[in-house]
Amino acid sequence: MFDLIAVQYSWLIPLLPLVGAVIAGFFGAKLLKQQSHWPIWIGVGLSALLSLSLLLGIADHQAHQPLTNGEYHPAPSDNAISKKWFTWILAGGDSSVYHTYGAEGHDVAKADGTKNPLAPFIVEAGAWIDQLTVVMLAVVTGIGLLITIFAAGYMKGETGYFRFFAYLGLFIFAMVCLVMANNFVMLYLGWEGVGLCSYLLIGYYYEKPAAREAAKKAFLVNRIGDFGFALGIMLTYLAFGTVSYFGNGAGTFTGALELATVTSHMSHFQSQAMAWIPFLLMLGAFGKSAQFPLYVWLPDAMEGPTPVSALIHAATMVTAGVYMIVRCGTLFVGNAPAMTTVAIVGAFTAIFAATIALRQFDLKKVFAYSTISQLGFMFVAVGVLAPVAGIFHLITHAFFKALLFLSSGVVMHAMAGELDMRKFSGLKKMLPKTRWLMLIGCLALSGCPFVSGFFSKDEIVGAAWAHSKPLGAVMLFTAFLTAYYTFRLYFQVFEGPEVLPSAPESADGHSSADSHDHGHHDEHHDHEPAIMVLPLIALAIGALLAGYLNWPGEQLGHFLHNSPSIALSQEVANKTYGDSNVNQVSFGGRETEEHSTNYLMIVSGLIALSGIGLAYQMHLKNRTAPEKLARQFSGITRLLEGKYWVDEVYQNAIVEPIRRLGRAFFMVDQIVINGLVWMLGFIPRACGFTLRQTTQRGYLQGYAATMIFGIAIILMIIFW
Amino acid sequence: MELLALQHYLVVGAILFGLGLIGFMTRRNLIVMFLCTELMFQGVAINLIAFSRYWADFRGQTFTIMLLVIAAAEASLALGMVVLLFRQKGTLDAEAWRELRG
């Protein structure tokens, strides 16, 4: 496996998009202009190829190996590689130790977990290449490539065209760093990098106040989470003396994630730290993956261009939290309160966001809340010890949500920036291809049987049901809501009588979301150019078929099971909760006993279909019904349309007090600090003023007298 | 014992210097003030000559000749400036130029 070309050149995977971004960024404004997408296309395309060859190479390698039977062999150096690129940070301690022996030869952390006092702080930039990494890499670069292709069509003619692509390349670089990292510091680099790019891209239309505000909000809310995340990483370093995931490889017990499994040899401090680390890391995950109470930035982030919403705020960045928890499974799984918290927050977020989505009318907003809700599903999965289901749903979700966002981008183009689904209807004539693509996306999202979302969501619901019945019931109900709001949107927008927005609003200089000059509804204008439709078709194929990655027969699970992160998590789970209480399949292991949740599959399929059926009744057959219902329950309607007033609560409970505190500090600053400084300046000025008024009065005689007086004093001093 | 001792010369020099100083301090007419500075010059020159004679050394007298030449040059310059100042304000009063104090 070491001899794979893609492993040897793994450093190219993050580097190529970065180079593309640099070229687009520095030469885009003057030279490339509307061709600025080329460096990004080439960079991301090549790294997607490398990622794919990495995935296939590892899958092929694994196919020639006997599968471990639910047991994890501690030396799977064949299955996972820590590929060092360069020594990034070497600070403190006795660095000569490092220079003589290298990180391998010297004892960074002793086996008993105490830190070698001579050990310097070492960060070796490099890739941790295992099954989880390659799957994530393939998703990030593959979907990234499709979306950059789509974006070239979507963003055509924008003034900041090169800027957009430069940010996009930078984002993919950061995301790849996040996914490939073999240590926490690099993970953090990627983590903050994607946050930065998200900020830049949400604020892409920076002339619009709403976009600026949304960008700031996203950045600040993420900072709150990242603060906890950074603390978690520091605590991990303090406890285990290293920031590396697995050090020199799984089985060597040189990395933090592996040392965390040795609970029997832990010092008091370490076991205390183990109680806190997951909660701190979790904060970062809740911020980045928009979970309650830190989800508020994601709906606002829809101010960014639609490809950004698809790539960053649906398919890749927001799933970083899920990935991180799965990656750091050994830190999480053994901590039952932390896992329960993750599951409960996930479930609450899922149902909370799904109910808000019921009464949203903006296409992108509906999908934004749906994304939050689906991320909640993923968190439930990792929370109930089913990381494979979480990653599975992450993959299928990446496909169908990217598809849905991009399709709504096409609708938005055709409607001249109008996204309010009350203003148009029956677009299937105008946008025939988009209609079918959107239908596929909606089927996948709603969990319609035999489409990708069905399999992944069903696994999560099943795992939740097995974990606790109420949790499973909540997830089932949320799945029903999901199916309903998805098809409410679909039926409203594409079916029924054709209604178009009355007047293309771009005529009166209106500047709402992405209104470029696509307002003319003439018949010859192509609303569905090939450059936009082809990537959508690829995504649609993924949305249809991605479910068969793990069904029937848990292929994806068995593949992922060879990732040390997941295998070791399983080991920890078995040790903590007992073998019989852990569903080995949900870690990708072989079934040890009958965990039959098949009947749930049928139930969740029926539930999805009933949701679709309800939407059909309410939004196609009898369109007045939902409004009548809304009027009947006006209280609930207002609650949902006000999004539970969470933003208002934040505004009044946090933003306003902080602003007031800031104003108070400003006053103190003005009066006390500025006063002191002013005083300091005033004293010499006062002295000068006095001297000027007394000695420098403009009388020549006075000057002469002063001179004589001075000479007299000097003479007296000399001759006295 | 000489008829005129060193002290006599020194006293004359001091009186000249003193008169010049007092005149400078009390008068406001630019020309008079300028003349007073000349007076102080001469007081100093007498001092130099007196000591020169006393020590029987001619360097002091040489120096005095130099001093007179420089004083003459300075006087021509200074008077020229006084004339210019007078043209500006139409008065010789030093008070008229108080604004230059900055």
Image (tube, rainbow, N blue to C red):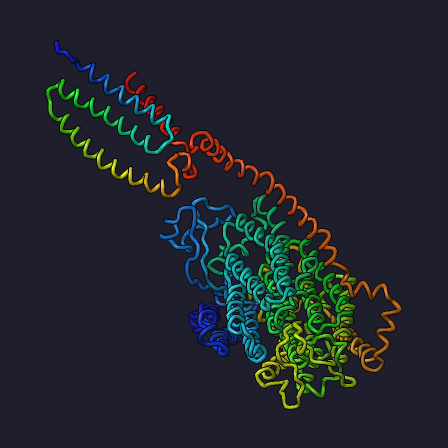
How many badges with numbers are in the image? Answer: 0
Residue A293 visible at all: yes
- Name the residue: 18% across, 23% down: B48
Residue A693, horizontal then vertical, whole percent: 47, 32
Query: Residue A541 sits in which quadrant?
Result: bottom right
As drawn, which residue projects farthest toward the right?
Answer: A632
Residue A555, horizontal then vertical, whole percent: 61, 74
Q: Between A142 and A531, which is closer to the camera in this rendering?
A: A531
- Name the residue: 25% across, 35% down: B75
Q: Between B84 and A673, which is closer to the camera in this rendering?
A: B84
Query: Residue A557 sits in which quadrant?
Result: bottom right
Q: Is residue A107 above or below residue A590?
A: above
Q: Quadrant of the C terminus of chain A?
A: top left
| A288 relative to B76 in the view: left or right | right
Q: Is residue A251 above or below residue A619?
A: above
Residue A29, horizontal then vertical, whole percent: 47, 72
As drawn, which residue projects farthest toward the front?
Answer: B90
Residue A557 visible at all: no
Q: Between A350 and A647, which is closer to the camera in this rendering?
A: A647
Residue A536, horizontal then vertical, whole percent: 61, 81
- Name the residue: 58% across, 79% down: A150
Q: Between A115 and A579, which is closer to the camera in this rendering?
A: A115
As drawn, which residue projects farthest toward the bottom?
Answer: A524
